[in-house]
Image (spheres, rainbow, N blue to C red):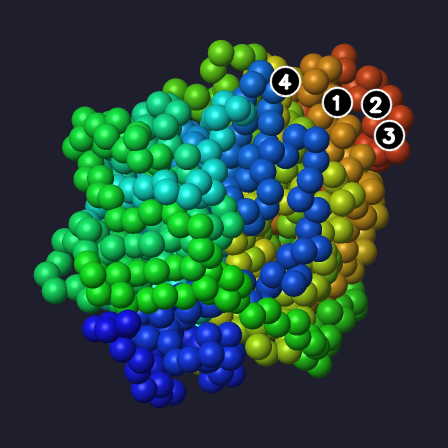
């Protein structure tokens, strides 16, 4: 008989709003249970049926993603992260996840615990975390609140990552008014594990013991998944209690203790306690194994007095893991955690009945069937763009006058833009050399990490572009996949797989659902053409406040493989005397879509308009040409041509290499489009003169246009007769832009 927190409760609209359930969903719960839920049971349903945990509006769309290849070792959605075979008996595990809403409320702790959570997802696969990446978006820094969010988030990431000893090797930062008050904080973690030692979260052996290890359970994070991450910020509400508090020093010893416990071979399943805390970890572990659970939460180590069963089950306190172990192995596993001075408590068992029974000692407070609890309702809506969105796509040259400023003044303004300017002021706060695997660190197109004990290396990158998806979400979805794969290819790596974090507004609005649906379809098509499966990911919806949504922002994390770490290539020009060429385009050809969503159009003309385009088949050939040229030793540098266009990309190569550039290439009357437009599928490469003919032959064989742009040398940056600046001048603009804007 249910009692205490197990007493059925009167349901009000306020209570349903608190746990982000609709009245129709509550009625569905009544129908599935054939009775009223208790307070604890309703809290469990609210957490697991939340958008954050249940993927109610996105799961039907996510089925469009290709999830398989000969290298994929995991089943997307079934485990905590994706696993990809890289040979030599090794696998790379990786995933990206959001901590947007918590970071909007408490930026330092929100960002820090986002790092901690994604690290534990990798740990739950049995992998040692070896790298962190992040994708961040904020409103303009001339606003005090945006500056507070920016500095708090960066501080939280550096504090947590540096303390746990995992290098932060790559990332991106973007600023736009649409993110004011709604920052995006997406964290990616990469881990390494033996392919035959990948752990599972599925608990399938009846009688196995559930061990809760790590931090004590407190009241922080309650309703984090349902109340915070599954609703919009429509009014001023005190939400700080829903933001978790991190302890990176405990996380560090938890990592070591869990890896040592896994090495014993005595752990049958392991699961992170993240969103929805113990409820999600225990129920999802049992559901994955086709079993049930019996928990006695009076055994849960608590750091606060008088916690109710409701609070214990829904707390999202950090630095906690759930292990499933055979009874005869409990003492041996506990001994490992005792060695590391990490608390290890026996809190329940795996049972044959597919139910979740929760008690406090002898008092039963929840008794639910696993199926209805773990299977949230799914919604397939009808999306429709607004007329305003349709009108924004219309852009012709005659509506964009040639700028009054000369080309070199525009170049300096773009180099100083916070979206383009050097981010060293941010990433120098991160330790990117700890673990001594980093070959190419922050600042290049992709980070490269050696795989010790082999000649191989992996490349990792993360990218997104909300502007393009705001204009044309299908093409924008394709472009973000293409760009992250292009970044990997510029390092010399063959793209193997991607992870995604889909950041959108309220999906119940037809225009937002349209953006979500179209972006996913675009991502799926790009993955098919470029042959990169989606192996893990996260969806973050309801990113809006007071009726204003963020730009639709799919963020893609990519993994690539180099067979020889010696081939790792950087974006910086490799020195004087190099030929500089453009793969993928003829500089004399321009189209209106080159301006679509460009930094030039927004920064110089104050407009976000146009209809971006990409030819995925050309993209595939351009990337192949770049990789082959690197493998054959023909090129010495490679840089993706993206934000700011050709002139900015050339300037970045020159600044990073500390060497001048003299260019002489055809530019049409619309010089602004040729120099600052953002046409896709272009890579700037540097190479010795004696490799020029070989590069032309290689590109021609693949049907890839190649244009000779100029050569490196001296201390000036010259482009035709339009720009003539000292490298020190362009360096000053690029190096000081973020700080001058308030960063």
Cβ atoms under marks 1 and 3 closer than 8 Å? yes
Distance from label 3 to label 2 (Cα)? 7 Å
The residue under the point 50% across, 66% down is 372
Give percent across and percent down for residue 365. 28, 67
Q: Residues within 10 Å of mark 1 (few under 14, many from 20)?
A: some
Distance from label 2 to label 1 (Cα)? 8 Å
Indicate whether 228 appears above or below 318: below
Pointer 1 residue? 628
Pointer 4 residue? 563
Residues 303 and 731: in front is: 303
Of marks 2 and 1, which one's residue comes earlier in the chain?
A: 1
Indicate whether 577 appears above or below 394: above
Distance from label 4 to label 3 (Cα)? 22 Å
Cβ atoms under marks 2 and 1 closer than 8 Å? yes
Residue 446 lies left or right of residue 265; in this view the side is: right
Pointer 2 residue? 698
Of marks 4 and 3, which one's residue comes earlier in the chain?
A: 4
Find numbered disc 2 in the image and state the secondary structure of the residue it sits on. Answer: helix
Cβ atoms under marks 4 and 2 closer than 8 Å? no
Find numbered disc 3 in the image and state the secondary structure of the residue it sits on. Answer: loop
Question: Foreground mark, 2 or 1?
Answer: 1
Give percent across and percent down for residue 661. 63, 30
Residue 696 lies left or right of residue 202; in this view the side is: right
Find numbered disc 1 in the image and state the secondary structure of the residue it sits on. Answer: helix
The residue under the point 74% across, 63% down is 611
Of marks 4 and 1, which one's residue comes earlier in the chain?
A: 4
Residue 735 lies left or right of residue 399; in this view the side is: left
Of marks 1 and 3, which one's residue comes earlier in the chain?
A: 1
Cβ atoms under marks 3 and 2 closer than 8 Å? yes
Is residue 626 something that shows in the picture? yes
In the drawing, what numbered circle is on residue 702?
3
């Amino acid at each position: 008989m249910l009692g205490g927190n197990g007493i059925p409760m009167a349901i009000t609209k306020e209570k349903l709003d608190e746990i982000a359930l609709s009245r129709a969903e509550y009625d569905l719960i009544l129908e599935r249970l054939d009775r009223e839920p208790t307070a604890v049971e309703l809290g469990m349903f609210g957490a697991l049926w939340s958008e954050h945990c249940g993927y109610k509006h996105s799961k039907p769309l996510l089925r469009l993603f290709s999830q398989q290849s000969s290298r994929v070792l995991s089943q997307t959605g079934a485990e905590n992260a994706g696993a990809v075979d890289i040979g030599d008996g090794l696998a790379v595990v990786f995933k990206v996840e959001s901590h947007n809403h918590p970071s909007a409320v408490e930026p330092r702790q929100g960002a820090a615990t986002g790092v901690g959570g994604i690290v534990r997802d990798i740990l739950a696969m049995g992998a040692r975390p070896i790298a962190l990446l992040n994708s961040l978006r904020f409103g303009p820094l001339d606003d005090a609140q945006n500056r507070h969010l920016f500095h708090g988030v960066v501080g939280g990431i550096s504090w947590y990552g540096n303390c746990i000893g995992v290098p932060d090797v790559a990332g991106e930062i973007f600023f736009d008014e649409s993110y004011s008050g709604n920052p995006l904080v997406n964290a990616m973690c990469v881990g390494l594990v033996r392919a035959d030692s990948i752990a599972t979260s599925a608990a399938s052996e009846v009688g196995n013991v559930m061990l809760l290890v790590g931090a004590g359970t407190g009241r922080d994070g309650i309703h984090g998944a349902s109340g915070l991450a599954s609703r919009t910020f429509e009014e001023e509400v005190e939400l700080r209690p829903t933001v978790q508090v991190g302890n990176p020093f405990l996380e560090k010893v938890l990592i070591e203790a869990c890896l040592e416990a896994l090495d014993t071979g005595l752990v049958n399943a392991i699961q992170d306690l993240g969103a929805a805390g113990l409820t999600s970890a225990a129920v999802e572990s049992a559901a994955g194994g086709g079993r049930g659970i019996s928990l006695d939460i009076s055994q849960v180590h608590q750091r606060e007095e008088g916690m109710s069963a409701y609070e214990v089950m829904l707390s999202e306190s950090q630095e906690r893991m759930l292990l499933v172990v055979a009874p005869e192995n409990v003492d041996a596993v506990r001994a490992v955690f005792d060695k590391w001075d990490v608390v290890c408590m026996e809190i329940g068992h795996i049972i044959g009945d597919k139910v979740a029974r929760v008690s406090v000692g002898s008092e039963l407070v929840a008794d639910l069937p696993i199926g209805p609890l773990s299977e949230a309702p799914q919604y397939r809506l009808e999306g429709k763009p607004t007329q305003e969105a349709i009108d924004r796509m219309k852009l012709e040259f005659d509506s964009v006058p040639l700028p009054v400023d000369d080309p070199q003044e525009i170049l300096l303004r773009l180099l100083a833009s916070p979206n383009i300017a050097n981010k060293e002021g941010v990433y120098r706060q991160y330790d990117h050399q700890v673990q001594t695997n980093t070959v190419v660190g922050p600042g290049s197109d992709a980070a490269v990490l050696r795989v010790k004990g082999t000649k191989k290396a992996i490349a990792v990158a993360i990218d997104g572009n909300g502007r393009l998806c705001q204009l044309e979400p299908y093409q924008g979805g394709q472009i973000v996949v293409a760009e992250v794969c292009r970044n990997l290819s510029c390092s010399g790596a063959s793209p193997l797989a991607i992870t995604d974090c889909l950041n959108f507004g309220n999906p119940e609005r037809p225009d937002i659902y349209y953006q979500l649906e179209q972006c996913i379809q675009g991502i799926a098509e790009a993955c098919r053409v470029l042959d990169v499966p989606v192996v893990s990911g996260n969806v973050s919806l309801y990113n809006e406040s007071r009726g204003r949504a963020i730009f639709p922002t799919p963020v893609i994390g990519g993994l690539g493989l180099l067979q020889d770490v010696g081939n790792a290539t950087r974006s910086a020009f490799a020195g004087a005397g190099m030929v500089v060429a453009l793969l993928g385009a003829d500089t004399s050809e321009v189209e209106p879509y080159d301006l679509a969503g460009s930094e030039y159009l927004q920064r110089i003309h104050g407009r976000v308009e146009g209809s971006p385009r990409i030819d995925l088949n050309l993209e595939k050939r351009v990337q192949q040409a770049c990789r082959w040229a690197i493998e054959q030793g023909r090129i010495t540098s490679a840089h993706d041509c993206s934000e700011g266009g050709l002139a900015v990309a050339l300037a970045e190569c020159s600044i990073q290499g500390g060497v001048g550039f003299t260019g002489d290439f055809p530019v049409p009357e619309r010089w602004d489009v040729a120099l600052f437009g953002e046409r896709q599928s272009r890579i700037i490469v540097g190479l010795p003169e004696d490799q020029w003919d070989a590069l032309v032959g290689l590109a021609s064989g693949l049907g890839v246009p190649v244009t000779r742009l100029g050569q490196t040398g001296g201390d000036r940056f010259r482009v035709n007769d339009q720009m003539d600046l000292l490298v020190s001048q362009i360096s000053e603009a690029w190096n000081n832009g973020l700080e001058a804007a308030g960063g």
